[in-house]
Image (tube, rainbow, N blue to C red):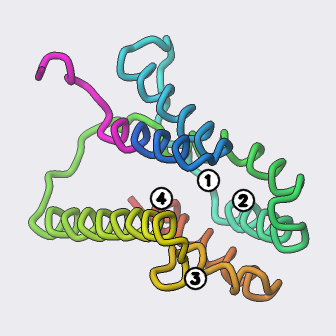
C-alpha cells in the first residue's frame, strides 16, 4: 500500500471526495471543476503529463492591485452568476493555477514548533468548517430546513445581494487570497 500511494498529492483525496459530493448533490458545474482538479492531480501523481513546473511566478503589487480592482468591478457591476462572472472565472483560472500549483525550488527552511502548531490549528479549523458545512447540508436535505442550521452560503447570501456588501466582501476576499498566497512577502 505504501508503494501504491508513494508521491500522492495530499489534496487528491480531498478533491475526489468533493467531486463525489457535488455529483451526489447535483451540482454539475462544481463537480466538473473539482473533477478536472482531481484528474490533474492524478495525472501529475502518475507522471502522465510530461511537463516541468517552473518556480512560483512573482507579481508586483501594482499588477495584483489592478487585477483585484478589475475583478472586483466586473463582479460588482455584473449580475451574480452572469456570463461576465463566467468569463472572468475562465480568465483567472489559469493564473490561479500557476499561483498555487508549482514546485518549490531551492532549500526549504526547517519546521519550527510555531509552524507545526500553526499547521495543526489551520488543519483543525478547516476540518471543523468542512464537517460543519457537510452537517448543515445533510440537515437541510433530510429535514427540509436550511434555517435551523444554515450553511455559510445561506448566511452570506443576504450580504452579497447588496452591491455595497458584495463590493466590500469581494475586495476582502481577494486580499485574503493575496495574504494566504503570500504574494507580497519579502524573502
The residue lying toward the viewer, choosing from 80 and 146, is 146
**Helix or strand or loop: what does disc 4 sit on?**
helix
The residue lying toward the viewer, choosing from 146 and 40, is 146
Query: In this rendering, is residue 27 above or below 101?
Result: below
Residue 104: x and y in percent read 36, 38
Query: In this rendering, is residue 176 above or below 85?
Result: below
As measured in the structure, the alpha-carbon distance from the residue carrying label 1 to the one carrying label 4 is: 11 Å
Nearest to the eye among marks 3 and 1: give it.
3
Residue farthest front in this picture: 143
Nearest to the eye among marks 4 and 3: give it.
3
Residue located beneath label 1 in the image? 59
| Numbered mark located on residue 49 in the image | none
The residue shown at (45%, 81%) is 149
Residue located beneath label 3 in the image? 155
Pointer 2 and pointer 1: residues touching (CB < 8 Å)? Answer: yes
Nearest to the eye among marks 2 and 3: give it.
3
As measured in the structure, the alpha-carbon distance from the residue carrying label 2 to the one carrying label 1 is: 7 Å
Q: Is residue 167 left or right of residue 182?
A: right
Residue 37: x and y in percent read 52, 35
Total marks in image: 4
**Helix or strand or loop: what does disc 2 sit on?**
helix
**Helix or strand or loop: what does disc 3 sit on?**
helix
At label 1, counting other C-alpha atoms closer than 10 Å, the crowd grade (few under 14, some 14-19, many 20 or more) is few
As measured in the structure, the alpha-carbon distance from the residue carrying label 2 to the one carrying label 3 is: 32 Å
Q: Which residues are magenta?
A: 1-14
**Comes first in the chain, label 3 or label 1:** 1
Residue located beneath label 2 in the image? 63
Residue 95: x and y in percent read 65, 44
Nearest to the eye among marks 4 and 2: give it.
4
| Numbered mark located on residue 181 in the image | 4
Pointer 3 and pointer 1: residues touching (CB < 8 Å)? Answer: no
Amino acid at each position: 500500500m505504501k508503494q501504491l500511494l508513494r508521491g500522492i498529492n495530499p489534496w487528491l483525496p480531498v478533491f475526489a471526495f468533493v467531486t463525489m459530493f457535488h455529483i451526489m448533490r447535483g451540482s454539475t458545474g462544481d463537480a466538473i471543476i473539482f473533477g478536472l482538479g482531481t484528474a490533474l492531480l492524478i495525472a501529475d501523481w502518475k507522471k502522465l503529463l510530461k511537463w516541468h513546473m517552473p518556480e512560483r511566478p512573482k507579481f508586483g503589487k501594482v499588477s495584483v492591485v489592478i487585477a483585484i480592482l478589475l475583478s472586483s468591478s466586473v463582479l460588482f457591476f455584473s449580475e451574480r452568476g452572469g456570463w461576465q462572472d463566467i468569463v472572468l472565472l475562465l480568465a483567472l483560472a489559469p493564473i490561479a493555477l500557476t499561483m498555487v500549483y508549482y514546485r518549490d525550488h531551492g532549500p526549504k527552511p526547517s519546521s519550527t514548533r510555531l509552524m507545526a502548531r500553526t499547521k495543526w490549528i489551520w488543519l483543525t479549523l478547516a476540518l471543523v468548517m468542512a464537517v460543519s458545512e457537510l452537517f448543515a447540508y445533510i440537515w437541510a436535505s433530510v429535514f427540509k430546513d436550511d434555517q435551523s442550521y444554515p450553511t455559510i452560503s445561506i448566511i452570506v447570501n443576504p450580504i452579497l445581494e447588496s452591491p455595497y456588501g458584495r463590493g466590500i466582501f469581494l475586495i476582502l476576499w481577494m486580499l485574503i487570497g493575496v495574504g494566504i498566497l503570500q504574494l507580497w512577502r519579502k524573502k
